[in-house]
Image (cartoon, rainbow, N blue to C red):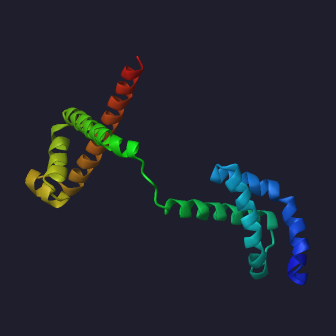
Amino acid sequence: MLYKQGNDIRVLAELYQRYMDLLYAICLKYLKNPETARDAVMNIFEELIPKLLKHEVSNFKGWLYTLAKNHCLMHLRAQKHHSVALDIEFMQSAENLHLNGVLEKEENLNQLAGCMESLSAEQKQSVQLFYLQEKSYKEIAGLTNTDWNQVRSQIQNARRNLKNCMEKNQVSENSDRIK
């Protein structure tokens, strides 16, 4: 690469200029803010200067794309670590959010109890022993005089049936709300 041979920043700037629109589009895609994306494009150029001296680059466009994507992801990760100032209105609504969460959990538990009734007797017994009484497959096999593989199969099938039942209830509940 010509820049690496002569260490001439003008050569790098001319090459970089060709890809600035692409970099801006990448940064805007990840950062979702035009001003932040423009800053990122400039920061990537500054980051590029020492990195090109260290790395052998055979496909500049692909390498630059990866560098830009990683720069944006690191920026987003750094933002997550900043503390968030909570306003009073948000703090006051926490009670409502908590209450809504409790009501939603209660509704889900009621649906789950109804779905448990749709299971076969063996599946229901295995699920209750495994999840509610915290028995192992081996213990359940001993208590029910059933093969270990059969217990595992019953629990897996019961979980699938419960999931399907819960999803079906969720879909019908959502369609009732729309009506």
Figure label count: 0
Residue 1 picture quarter: bottom right
- Is 63 in front, or is 19? 19
Furthest toward the top, the residue is 179
Residue 20 picture quarter: bottom right
Provide residue 114's location: percent of width, then percent of height.
21, 32
- Is 136 in front, or is 80? 80
Q: Is residue 63 visible?
A: no
Q: Residue at x 18, y 55 (%)?
A: 147
Provide residue 69's location: percent of width, then percent of height.
67, 61
Please say if 81 is above or below 108.
below
- Quick check: 100 left or right of 25? left
Please say if 50 is above or below 176.
below
Please say if 19 is above or below 97.
below
Provide residue 6's location: percent of width, then percent of height.
91, 82
Q: Residue at x 19, y 57 (%)?
A: 137
- Quick check: 5 left or right of 56? right
Placement of the C terminus among the 4 image quadrants: top left
Provide residue 34's location: percent of width, then percent of height.
70, 50
Q: Is residue 174 visible?
A: yes
Q: Residue at x 20, y 57 (%)?
A: 148
Furthest toward the left, the residue is 143
